[in-house]
Amino acid sequence: MKATAAQPRVLKHQVVRAHVESLLDTLTEGDPVPAERELATRFDVSRETVRAALRELLVAGRIERRGRGTVVARPKVVQPLILGSYTEAALAAGLSVGRELVGWRNLSADEALAADLALEPGAPVLELERVLLVDGVRVGLERTRLPTERFAGLDEHFDHTSSLYAAIRSRGIEFARAVERIEAAMPDAREAALLDADPRTPMLLLSRVSYDRDGIPIEHRRSLYRGDRMAFVATVAS
């Protein structure tokens, strides 16, 4: 007999997820989702099975937590991977963008940061940390580190609600390229609180070093985005 490939096993919570997704298709953004107990009774499964299904739907961005309840979520914000500001891209897409200042800090570059920014270890560095909002929702936590000597006074004059990239370009600095790493991450307690997210929410961590036309590093940026609210798309050409 001809051998056949083993069929993938469909887990019970995946069946429940499909049923709940069908239910969500009948609802609109902001509508309440039935409680775990009600869904467990409706589909004759345990609450743990329902919880696993809802967890996947939360990560997929189909539902979101509001207080003690769960509601139908708006679609994820999809942003292009670009050499520039993601908030500028969001504005270009017609979205409402906001930035909340977490704070400025003066740092001394450790060996890793010094290597990224082509500095001597111990060189002074400016750090700017902001929460990024799209349509009023906290979606990202952005930490940018800049050589103090090159950006002296920026912390005194920069409007934190505006585009940092625009402020850098206004100094005559042109972005030429960037090296970016994207990976999955989990937030720590502080990050989850700043993003108003469940500490178990998967995140997208983007780490970038940007360079000017002379190959000199401009910034080291670490951006943590909520995986349940954000997605990124890249265009690749041959």
Image (tube, rainbow, N blue to C red):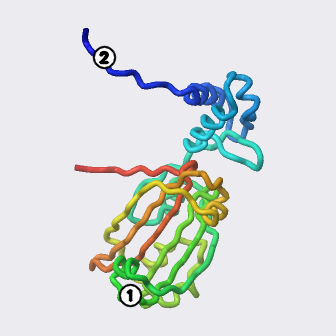
Q: Nearer the viewer, residue 110 or 86?
A: 110
Q: Nearer the viewer, residue 94 or 219?
A: 219
Which labelled disc corresponds to residue 121? 1
For image coordinates 50% across by 25% down, the residue present is 10
Which labelled disc corresponds to residue 4? 2
Q: Quadrant of residue 74?
A: top right
Whole-percent x, y for residue 121 in the image: 38, 87
Task: State the residue lying farthest toward the top.
Answer: 1
Q: On the picture, is 177 further left or further right than 65? A: left
Whole-percent x, y for residue 116 in the image: 36, 76
Q: Nearer the viewer, residue 121 or 218?
A: 121
Q: Is residue 70 above or below residue 115?
A: above
For image coordinates 33% across by 76% down, the residue present is 212
Whole-percent x, y for residue 204 in the image: 49, 55
The amino acid on which the numbered mark 2 sits, given as a three-letter code, is: Thr
For image coordinates 61% across by 43% down, the residue present is 58
Q: Is residue 178 above or below residue 186?
A: below
The amino acid on which the numbered mark 1 sits, given as a three-letter code, is: Pro
Q: Nearer the viewer, residue 47 or 211?
A: 47
Q: Is residue 117 above or below residue 123?
A: above
Q: Quadrant of residue 48?
A: top right
Local SS, label 1: loop
